[in-house]
Amino acid sequence: MRTGMLGVMALILVGAVVGWSLSATTETISVAGAQPTPAGPRFDGTAPTESAPPPIGYEPGWYDASGMTPDEAVNVAIYENVNRSVVNINTLGLRSEGFFLLATPERGNGSGSVLDQQGHILTNYHVVEGARQVAVTLFDGETYPATLVGSDAVNDIAVLKIEAPVDDLYPTSLGDSESLRVGMRVFALGNPFGLDRTMSEGIISSLNRSLEVQENWIIQSIIQIDASINPGNSGGPLLDAHGQMIGMNTAIASRVNQSAGIGFAIPISLIHRVVPELIEHGRVIRGNIGISSVTIVDEGLRIAILDEGGPAERAGLRGPEVVRRRTGPLVFESIDRASADIIVAVDGMPVATVADLQAILGEKRPGDVVNVTVLRQGEIAEVAVELGE
């Protein structure tokens, strides 16, 4: 058994060397002014030569003056430019447990990004949800108490604020998530397992994923990555190869709560829309259609409960009818749910689930008018609804 294992290890070692040699001879990268790396002290005690011997397949121009490849130089530059913008977030909450539901302290940690020199910090809502105390630790190890400025649970975004010296706050450079392509390199920074300002590298594995963060609420246009993210990475920045923030790491697909090569990030385009409202209002102001409950049927969403006097009712949308039947001195009431309108589309976009409806309305503001297509008594009808707040 031991001999077999040694053989396998030898094959792996040989394969690694051969693989490097093959890749080295199939691509030449030119970097002006590159020199071989100076040699360090020898293990045998003899004096070093002027420069280290070139590696197998070495060609001049592969390394810069510090001995790094172009890829390594990019990685190092990104980390050195951005790591001061990443913060560690520690929370303290209470959890009820046991037969008597005794309150037990519960600690958590996550990551965040410095938004500006006013002390605003971006993170995930689930990082600070239910926390009674929140503390933010900057790159220099200084820790500050944080207050919650605003949060948007349905998009898993929160903004905190700390009172820290302006010179200690290094805002993150925000990029663009609208022009991303599958295969682009990305870098995730954060505090996995409390290991502060850790960087991992990967690529964009897919775009326009959907991620359910709250019941019946799905975030659209989620970025899927293969860079390693683990518990504690939540809220940290996802960077492109220019060191600009293109998303916020928020979730992993794993049955053991550890990286399985599938991670998800909220796109910066959504963050751009949400954060200003959180800072100004403490919440996101969305349009309200005035429908409290629906049931899913084959055709779409049947209205179950209309808000009394709400936008939908005022516009003429119909919910279930109350049928009264008199028998002698007694009056019996029943609900005719089949008479309610079935929503099949909003603004021409088909609606089959609650998430579909929420996704459409989530982009609307109070005062916006939406055209609701309904199936009413077997006939198609169009109803214009002005959204409330």
Image (cartoon, rainbow, N blue to C red):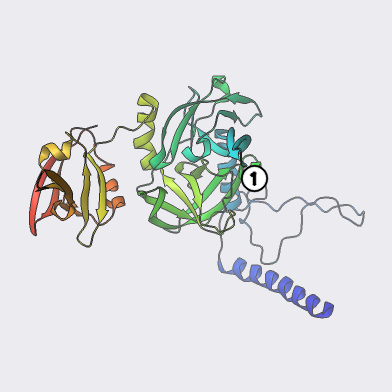
Indicate the position of residue 103 as horizontal and vertical percent values. 61, 34
Q: Which residue does the image show at 68% across and 69% down from the upper left?
A: 16
Q: How many marks?
A: 1
Note whether 54 is above or below 286 in the view shown: below
- Residue 273 visible within the image: yes
Indicate the position of residue 366 as horizontal and vertical percent values. 22, 33
Indicate the position of residue 244 as horizontal and vertical percent values. 47, 41
- Residue 317 visible within the image: no
Indicate the position of residue 220 as horizontal and vertical percent values. 35, 50
For the residue pair 131 and 185, the one nearer the viewer reads as 131
Which residue in the rendered view is the most extreme toward the right? 45
> Which quadrant would the N terminus be assigned to in this image?
bottom right
Which residue in the rendered view is the most extreme toward the front? 328
Q: Which residue does the image show at 66% across and 67% down from the upper left?
A: 57
Q: Is residue 323 left or right of residue 218?
A: left
Q: Which residue does the image show at 48% across and 22% down from the upper left?
A: 118
Q: Residues within 10 Å of mark 1 (few under 14, many from 20)?
A: some
For the residue pair 256 and 20, the one nearer the viewer reads as 256
Q: Is residue 45 left or right of residue 27?
A: right
Q: Which residue does the image show at 68% across and 73% down from the upper left?
A: 15
Which amino acid lies under the numbered mark 1 shown in the image of this protein?
Phe
Note whether 95 is above or below 327 in the view shown: above
Residue at the disc numbered 1: 193
Kind of element beneath mark 1: helix
Note whether 227 is above or below 368 in the view shown: below
Q: Is residue 227 left or right of residue 66?
A: left
> Which quadrant would the C terminus be assigned to in this image?
top left
Note whether 204 is above or below 22 in the view shown: above
For the residue pair 375 and 67, the one nearer the viewer reads as 375
